[in-house]
Amino acid sequence: MPYTDHIKQLVAALPNTPGVYQYFNQEGKIIYVGKAKNLKRRVSSYFNKSQQSAKVTALVKHIYDLKYIVVESETDALLLENNLIKQYQPHYNILLKDGKTYPWLCITKEEYPRIFKTRQVMRGAEYFGPYSSVWVLDTLLDLIRSIYPVRTCKMPLFTDKIEAGKYKLCLEYHIKNCMGPCEGKQSKEEYQKMITEIREIAKGNSSVITSMLQNEMKQLAAEYRFEEAAAVKAKYDALLQYRNKTVITTTATENMDVMSYEEDGNAVYINMLHIVEGSIVKGLTIEYNKLMDEAPEEVLAMGMLELRDRLGSKAKTVLVPFIPSIELDGVTLSIPQRGDKKKLLDLSAQNVKQYKVDKYKISEKLNPEQRQTQVLNALKEHLKLEKLPMHIECFDNSNISGDSAVAACVVYKKAKPSKKDYRKYTIKTVQGPDDYASMREVVFRRYKRMLDEQTPLPDLIVADGGVGQMESIRQVIEDELKLNIPIAGLAKNDKHQTRELLFGFPPQSIGLKATDTCFKFLAGMQEEVHRYAIEFHRDKRSKKQTASELDEIKGIGQETKNKLLLTFKSVKRIKESTLENLENCIGKHRASIVYEYFHA
């Protein structure tokens, strides 16, 4: 199959996060499942011809669609990949011949529980994991046994038989790996206390143990026993790694569905993860467009029915972010607050949010002007404008105590900076620091010239300032030039951050949130005009600081001034120089002009 536009759009929108991707053939069948630390980078590599092997080329020819599920970590991606490969057995995946699964930590439910590693999950015990690394689990078991001397024998210990003397001590007791509960040398209460603490470690609540190991490392290092300290560090690292508990696979035997819901204007996105015997095997996100003001409960109910039908789910448990407006016979709806089920709900929410982001990316690539039009439509609605503000101009002043006073105007057309239309102004008629008078001068010069040249006027004028700046602009636009152009202002707080959007006369706050798209657009425009004005002001001050009395001599250009300063080093020496010396430097004609200026 060729690298179609559809696939290009999907690849371009992929997130830079861990996850699992699935390739589908023309019939909609999964032909490959893969994991990735970075989905965008990994999937893109399949379509890089310079790096393709013969096997990858054969796979790519059959790819007609792709889907993905984002997860929290690379480990979760590995576990989910394993689940999906076993579920679908894709044609291009290497399958595990022995059907092995990832190992678990098992704590039996006996009077004196045993702790061991297993790959089979059965009733009658507690299971923690699974582990993508057997080494991590082995290290954890060694750590537990080095701290807690739990029994390793397989004898079914019972209190009445212990009291009857039915058991004998083994070698593990004599080498101090066991406290000998089989002969009553350790009470049942003491043994259960150890199991309770081990269970907390298995759940990831190992802060006490890690603190103890950290202190032991420091003590050994202080005593220059570095090899022993390194061994303790290995245990410490294993515990930290174990804390990152996965929810991609759980020991729950029930099937369940996990729903999440995300709104964006009239668009609604609903994700479902389908769990079979504790493993995520399917995931899908759909989109609805609300035609009326439907309640979220109603939309979630429709989405739940649609997704369960598409994925063929008959699960009796559905985890939801809120209760939908529907009851299904024999199905329990619940909103988890903690634990693995809450983590599954969070994972589904992460996927639905990522789907929304991807839709934006694809939409912007297909129609780059769509986002700009949305911003301008929103701005028109907020300000109650008669037409779209396709042409916006923003003004700002810059000076230090009135020195080198300048102003700047930036122009946005179709919500994008039109830098060829930017303008800089040196304040000519205002003496001292008077921002309002400077604004009136610049606005008059700008729009008087546009009227004289019959240049199209803007649809909206924005002042980098509050009520005072807006009134200064209004006086020029309405009172002097008799124009009707809407005027807005962007007021700042004490930290020079955009605080609010003002509009109308008398100016009123529009009440946009800082997270609103319109607010961000206008704040960006304000930052741009401020940057442009500041740069111009710095240039003016720099030139002024490097100016000299030579600048006042008519008929003397910059090249001549440079020659004079290079030869005589200062203006004072140029003044004191003879006409002959000046002629040797810059010629008779220019030398006479300079000499007469200083000796007239």
Image (tube, helix red, strand yellow):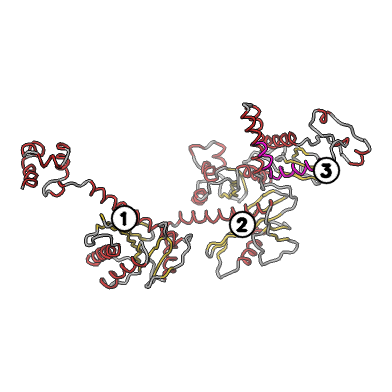
Residue 358, disc? none
Amino acid, disc 2: Asn
Q: Disc 3 residue type?
A: Glu
Q: Distance between the residues labelled 1 and 2?
A: 48 Å
Residues 107 and 57: in front is: 107
**How far apart are the alpha carbons under marks 3 and 1?**
77 Å
| Image location (x, y in percent) of residue 308 | 67, 58
Determine the secondary structure under disc 1: helix
**Residue 207, above or below 421:** above
Q: Position of residue 374 (x, y in %)?
A: 45, 63
Task: Please tell me whether residue 106 is drawn above or below residue 518 in the rendered image.
Answer: above
- Mark 2 vs mark 3, foreground winner is 3
Residue beneath the point at 56% across and 70% down: 293
**444 on left or right of 200:** left
State which region is magenta: 190-214
Query: Pointer 1 and pointer 2: residues touching (CB < 8 Å)?
Result: no
Residue type at mark 1: give it: Ala
In the image, is residue 205 part of the stretch drawn in magenta?
Answer: yes
Name the residue: 55% across, 69% down: 291
The quadrant in which residue 563 appears is top left
**Where's residue 3, x and y in %?**
50, 46
| Residue at the farthest right position | 164
Q: Is residue 112 left or right of residue 298?
A: right
Reading the image, the residue beneath label 1 is 533
What is the spatial separation of the Cα atoms under label 2 and label 3, in whole angstroms? Answer: 47 Å
Q: In the displayed structure, does residue 293 sit left or right of residue 594?
A: right
- Pointer 2 or 3: first along the chain: 3
The verdict on residue 195 being magenta is yes
538 on left or right of 319: left
In the image, 488 versus 327, the foreground residue is 488
Pointer 2: what residue? 271
Q: Return the mark for residue 189.
A: 3
